[in-house]
Image (cartoon, grey):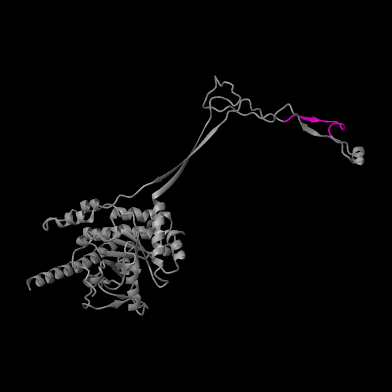
Amino acid sequence: MTSKQHTCSFAARAESEILPALSSYLLSLISIKQSSLCVSADVHSTSALLRLAEEIGDSICVLKTHADIIDDFSDRTIKGLQEIATRKHFLLFEDRKFGDIGNTVQSQYTRGPLRIAKWAHLTNAHIFPGPAVIPALHSAATTALISLNQSVSTEISTGTPRGSIDGLSTTGTDPDEDTAIDPLPPTISPSSNNAGPKPSNSDEQDHAPHQQTTLSPTSPVFDMSHRRTSIVTATTTISQTFEPSPPNPATLSRSLSSSSTDKPLDRAAALAELGPPPHARGLLLLAEMSSEGNLMGQGYTEKCIEAARNDKDFVLGFVAQRNLNKREMGDEFLVFVPGVALPPEEEEVERGGVKGDGKGQRWRGPYEVMQEGADVVIVGRGILNARDKAAEAERYRKEAWRGYQDLLGANKEKGKGKGKR
């Protein structure tokens, strides 16, 4: 039986001991920011990407990127994203959709101009090449994190000893000032025909008088008597550092739940207590898509779930259209649902209606999606095309959160009803 996700709160679910650290962190982050919103940043320049992240960062829990459509993607893009994500408290999700043999996806994940494993907390993959894509990406993520934790620095220093190379004292000279090297020109002396070996060709002796230039053996090319030696020292340091672990989710959950209902949550203090994300990477499997006519049938979806259960430390959940967890299997996967949109504020839309973009995309509202057990709703053009992106992101955040709270409240009421019978 497929379970409804929100039979307990995000904060309570973060306490689960079987969840990966990154899942617990995200659930805590969602609870503190009261946001299940992920915005798909489908823009084409670094400046547009960073500007969008700055505008909507306070309203989201995850920013989804397509790095391969950023025309000027570089280290500046990565550093800018990381700085804003840290300051505004959201995770980075690169929507790479890996789908190749293990060796290839490892290189795509860690190398090239994108170097996704370096900066993206989350990425995703298809399993149509086979489930081996999961351990391949997991291994690459582990190696990348170790590499990011290590730094190698080499310091090169030079110095000049006080004594000269021939042991003579340098008293009276400035120890910090090198003595100039005065090369002496070679002594050039013309020699007669009988100096040195004579050519064997008699015609040359008769018709081409020979003149030889020699260096005087008693006159060195360089006078080394005043030259000092220099010492070059190279020191290589290999250091390893670790990011601080986030606080125990159970402790954080208790501090959140103990807040009085008539006293607003001190969100800044809670975020400070939560701290930075754990030094970890996570994978989402593409189990279902929102596009019309896609080929991800139920059989494929079941294979995704089966593969995810074999690596629960790395596979955090799914990109899907519904909750895929099965209570009897002990599943606690997160579900990210794309294809979410709201009509313009001034328009009235029939409840439950499904709209599209005329290009195969089907949309549902954030309230509806959260009512069906989503953890994170993915929104793209509905926010990107808005004049006031920050205000529109807030509208989506509030609507999704309302759906979550109504579902949570309804489930609690059902629980009370069962207890009375």
Tell me what residue is drawn at x 81 percent, y 31 percent: 190
Q: How many marks?
A: 0
Tell me what residue is drawn at x 41 percent, y 63 percent: 136
Question: Visible in this render: residue 289?
Answer: no
Give above or below for 120 relative to 151. Answer: below
Tell me what residue is drawn at x 39 percent, y 59 percent: 141
Task: Provide the major secondary structure of the magenta segment.
Answer: loop
Query: Is 225 situated left or right of 216 in this image?
Result: left
Residue that sits furthest to the top in the current view: 172
Is 149 inside the magenta-drawn segment?
A: no
Tell me what residue is drawn at x 55 percent, y 32 percent: 230
Find residue 380 and report its horizontal and vertical position in percent: 32, 68
Find residue 166 and report its horizontal and vertical position in percent: 61, 24
Is 195 inside the magenta-drawn segment?
A: yes
Name the one closer to the observer, 168 or 419. 419
Name the one closer to the observer, 335 or 16. 16
Name the one closer to the observer, 217 or 269. 217
Query: Is 139 situated left or right of 25 in this image?
Result: right
Question: Visible in this render: residue 414?
Answer: yes
Give above or below for 209 relative to 14. Answer: above
The residue range painted magenta reads 186-196
Find residue 356 and report its horizontal and vertical position in percent: 31, 77
Find residue 405 and report its horizontal and vertical position in percent: 17, 66
Picture quadrant of residue 307: bottom left
